[in-house]
Image (cartoon, grey):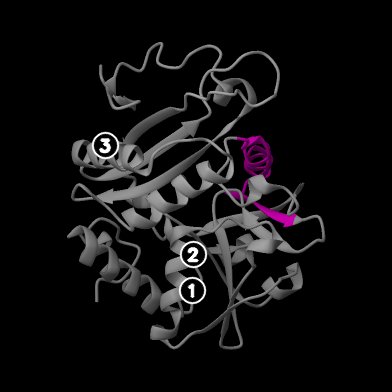
Amino acid sequence: MTDIWLNGAFAPCDGAIAANDRGLLLADGVFDTALVLGGRVFRMGEHLDRLAGAAGRLEIPVARKDIQAAMSALAERQVNGSIRLTVTRGPGPRGIALPPDPRPTLLGSSAPLTPSAMFSTIRLDVSSIRRNETSPTTRVKSLAYLDAVLANHAARQVGVDEALFLNTKDRVACSALANVFVLKDGELSTPPLADGVLDGITRRWVLAHAGEFGLAVRERSLGLADLAGATVFLTNSLRLVSPATLDPSTIGQTDGSLTPLMIGLCQAIAGECGIDPRALSAVVEPH
C-alpha cells in the first residue's frame, strides 16, 4: 500500500526509513502538521515557510519546492484530513557531528479528518516537566517530542486531556499540543515566543485578526494566576480554537465570548479551502 510520500513519490510504508537515519536515532529533524479540506491546505504558504525555515535554521538543506510538492500531492490524495511532513537530516555515520554532505529525508503522511476534535473543550493539568525557553528546539516543531509525550501521558493518568507547560521561570508557555490564549478584562493575551513558544499558524491567525472581533490582543508573559477567572483557549492547526480549563467543574460552561472568533476562523478556512468546518463539526453555531 502506497500510503506515504518519501523523497518525491508515494512509497510503501514498510521499510521506508533507513536504519541510520538521524531523525530516528537522534531526533535530528523537524515536522509540520496542517489541515486539508477540499484538497486544499489552510494557510499552505505559511506552513511551507515555517517548515522550510525551521529546516534552514537547523542547516538541513531541503528545498521549499520539494516540501510543496509533497504537501500538494498529499492534499489532493487525502481531500479532507490532516497532513504531516517530516524532514530529517537523513542517514549519517555514528556520532553526533553533522555529516559533511547531508542527504535529507522528506517524509509525508496523511490521515482522515477528526471533526469532533475541532473546537472541543480541553481539560488541562500543569505538568511537572518544564519547557526550556533557552532551547532552540522550542522555536521549531522538533522531532524531540518526548517531553510532550510523557507530560500528556501523565495528564491522562489523572483524568484530564492535556498537559500545560510552564517554562523554567514559571511562566505559562504552551500545552503539549497547542498555543495558549487568555481572555480577561477585555484583553486577549498569549505568551511571547521568547517564553518557549512555537510560532503556531493558528496563533498567527488569531493575533492578526482578533481586532476584527473587538478583541484587544497582545503578547505578554503569563503566570498561572492570569488564567484564574479568565476565558482560556488553545489553538493548533487541527483542533483550531479549543476552550480550555484547569477546573474540570467548568467543562461545558461557556460565555460565548469566543464564538465570533471561532466563526471568523471558519469563514477564513471556507474562503481558502471551499469547505466551512461548521459543516463538519457541530460545536460552533452555524450562524
Between discs 3 and 1, the one toward the N terminus? 3
Q: Nearer the viewer, residue 99 or 265?
A: 99
Q: Viewed as shown, does residue 224 lie left or right of 156?
A: right
Q: Viewed as shown, does residue 137 lie left or right of 10?
A: right
Q: Are marks 1 and 2 in contact (CB under 8 Å)?
A: yes
Q: In the rendered image, is residue 202 in sight? A: yes
Q: In the rendered image, is residue 117 in sight? A: no
Location of residue 45 (image quadrant): bottom left
Q: Which amino acid, mark 2?
A: Arg
Find residue 74 and name its label: 3
Residue at left offset 28%, top offset 69%:
268
> Mark 2 highlights which residue?
203
Query: Could you say where residue 72 lies in the image, as x and y percent from the top left?
Result: 25, 42
> Mark 1 highlights which residue?
207
- Say if the magenta span includes residue 165: yes
Q: Which amino acid, mark 1?
A: Leu
Secondary structure of the residue carrying numbered label 2? helix
Q: Nearer the viewer, residue 226 or 62?
A: 62
Q: Viewed as shown, does residue 230 lie left or right of 85?
A: right
Between discs 3 and 2, the one toward the N terminus? 3
Measure how far apart labels 3 and 1 are at the Cα level. 29 Å
* The C terminus lies in quadrant: bottom left
